[in-house]
């Protein structure tokens, strides 16, 4: 990337201070400096050799401040704080408001830092302030801090700095984070009731089949031989004996199965097969696909709208799908785009993405309105995701009740059949 040397008034001592900044062009360099609260006196391009020398002298920072004071050479303080997703969203939104109000970046960051009460969040913002004051751009400062600033957030911030639309794109980033938080909460809330119902039904069946019914049936074993007991009764007794005598073996088997599934998820080939299989499961596959498509559409639309090239935006968006089969399709799309082809064709061939999305992308590419059409389509797919989740959460309890009814009916049959046999024997 081209480098520019600029001069600005130094507040630490008399005279001017000089520094080096990397940007696509001179206008972008000026915009980036102004977002940091710096008004340059002179901005001029320099050669790659001069830029590398300046970076080597200043620990290879993207923006290298050569201030007269010694504070610029202080090492970055270690980050020992934490920030949740909701706190990150609030921070980004507050920063967007401050920047759009015309506050210089450093002043906006310090204002937000003073208002924060949580020590962990305050430490994260303090580390960002430290990096920005010592010459780094906001995007690079967030990248160096790490969690909770992921690749997506950092890329959007960098795009905002380079394009001179930092405040606007920060607001878009906050909206994207809010939608992600809302989707996660909907997933959690939608799974609480089915999970509680599953635990209650499984516990009730376990107590009835493993403890109560065997005690009732064993009272009849003295009157009926083992061979005279009905098949359902022998099954229930066998299950009860299995749980009573070999519960430790069952626990080991469950542990090994969970461990094997986790190991399979860590193996790329096995993970790909599992993810493909999940997409084919009725209802569940539909919900998983709708969630992935909604995330993909909203994120891709936000990135492209922020000014990132389509290929870069696709590579960043790929990780939001959380499904290796669909990620493989996006990887193929990236290869096609890099060779000059369209986005829509390979997505349509895969069969994983709905035809409505591929048609919208194809139309957006032809009309030159891809960002706007993606953002409009994101709302449609988010509504579809909400409906799919409602369908899943309404069907799961019904399926659980049906399974419980079948099991209870089988257990009651195991109890009633020997009683009827004893009555027949008594009658004879």
Image: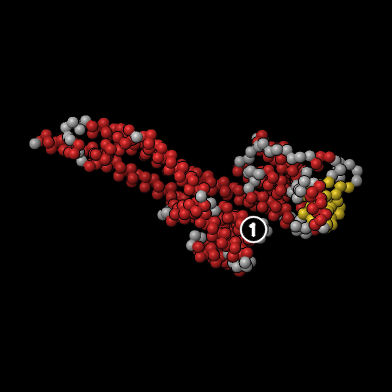
Say above or below: 91 vs 382.
above
In percent of width and height, residue 240 lies at 30, 35
Q: Quadrant of residue 330 in the image?
A: bottom right
Q: Nearer the viewer, residue 37 or 237?
A: 237
Q: Residue 303: in sight, yes or no?
A: yes
Q: Residue 378: in sight, yes or no?
A: no
Instruction: Residue at 43% x, 41% y: name it.
Output: 256
303 relative to 286 in the view: left or right: right
Q: Nearer the viewer, residue 256 or 411?
A: 256
Q: Nearer the viewer, residue 76 or 160?
A: 76
Name the outermost residue toward the bottom.
Answer: 366
Instruction: Residue at 36% x, 39% y: name it.
Output: 201
Other-residue count near label 1 (Cα within 10 Å), few / some / many at <14 / 14–19 / ≥20: some
Instruction: Residue at 76% x, 48% y: name it.
Output: 61
Q: Quadrant of the C terminus?
A: top left
Residue at the spot of label 1: 312
Disc 1 secondary structure class: helix
379 relative to 97 in the view: left or right: left
Q: Quadrant of residue 49 in the image?
A: bottom right
Say above or below: 41 vs 215.
below
How does the figure colour the protein chain or chains? Answer: secondary structure
Instruction: Residue at 86% x, 51% y: name it.
Output: 7
In percent of width and height, residue 423 lies at 14, 36
Name the outermost residue toward the left.
Answer: 428
Say above or below: 108 vs 243.
below
In percent of width and height, residue 24 lies at 75, 58
In percent of width and height, residue 384 lies at 49, 55
Say above or below: 205 vs 373.
above
């Amino acid at each position: 990337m081209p480098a520019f040397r600029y001069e600005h008034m130094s507040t630490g001592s008399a005279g001017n201070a000089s520094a080096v900044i990397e940007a696509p062009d001179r206008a972008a360099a000026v915009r980036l400096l102004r977002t940091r609260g710096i008004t340059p006196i002179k901005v001029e391009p320099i050669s790659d050799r001069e830029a590398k020398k300046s970076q080597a002298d200043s620990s290879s920072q993207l923006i290298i401040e050569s201030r007269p004071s010694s504070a610029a050479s202080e090492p970055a303080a270690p980050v020992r704080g934490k920030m949740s997703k909701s706190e990150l969203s609030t921070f980004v939104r507050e920063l967007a408001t401050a920047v759009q109000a015309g506050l210089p970046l450093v002043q906006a960051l310090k204002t937000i830092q003073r208002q924060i009460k949580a020590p962990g969040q305050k430490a994260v913002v303090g580390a960002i302030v430290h990096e920005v004051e010592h010459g780094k751009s906001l995007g690079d400062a967030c990248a160096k801090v790490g969690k909770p600033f992921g690749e997506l957030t950092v890329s959007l911030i960098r795009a905002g700095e380079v394009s001179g639309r930092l405040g606007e794109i920060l607001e878009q980033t906050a909206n994207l984070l809010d939608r992600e938080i809302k989707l996660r909460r909907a997933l959690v809330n939608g799974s609480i009731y089915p999970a509680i119902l599953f635990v209650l039904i499984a516990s009730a069946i376990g107590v009835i089949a493993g403890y109560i019914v065997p005690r009732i049936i064993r009272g009849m074993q003295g009157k009926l031989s083992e061979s005279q007991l009905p098949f359902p009764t022998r099954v229930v007794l066998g299950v009860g004996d299995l749980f009573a005598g070999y519960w430790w073996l069952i626990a080991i088997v469950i542990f090994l199965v969970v461990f094997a599934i986790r190991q399979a998820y860590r193996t790329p080939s096995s993970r790909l097969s599992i993810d493909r299989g999940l997409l084919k499961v009725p209802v569940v596959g539909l919900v998983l696909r709708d969630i992935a498509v909604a995330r993909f559409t909203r994120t891709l639309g936000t990135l492209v709208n922020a000014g990132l090239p389509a290929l870069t935006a696709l590579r960043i968006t790929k990780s939001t799908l959380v499904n290796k089969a669909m990620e493989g399709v996006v990887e193929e799309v990236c290869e096609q785009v890099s060779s000059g082809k369209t986005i829509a064709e390979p997505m349509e061939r895969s069969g994983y993405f709905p035809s409505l999305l591929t048609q919208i992308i194809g139309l957006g590419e032809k009309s030159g309105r891809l960002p706007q059409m993606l953002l409009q389509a994101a709302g449609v797919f988010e509504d579809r995701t909400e409906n799919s989740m409602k369908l899943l959460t309404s069907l799961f309890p019904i399926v659980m009740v049906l399974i419980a009814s079948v099991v209870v009916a089988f257990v009651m049959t195991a109890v009633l059949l020997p009683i009827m046999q004893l009555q027949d024997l008594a009658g004879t």
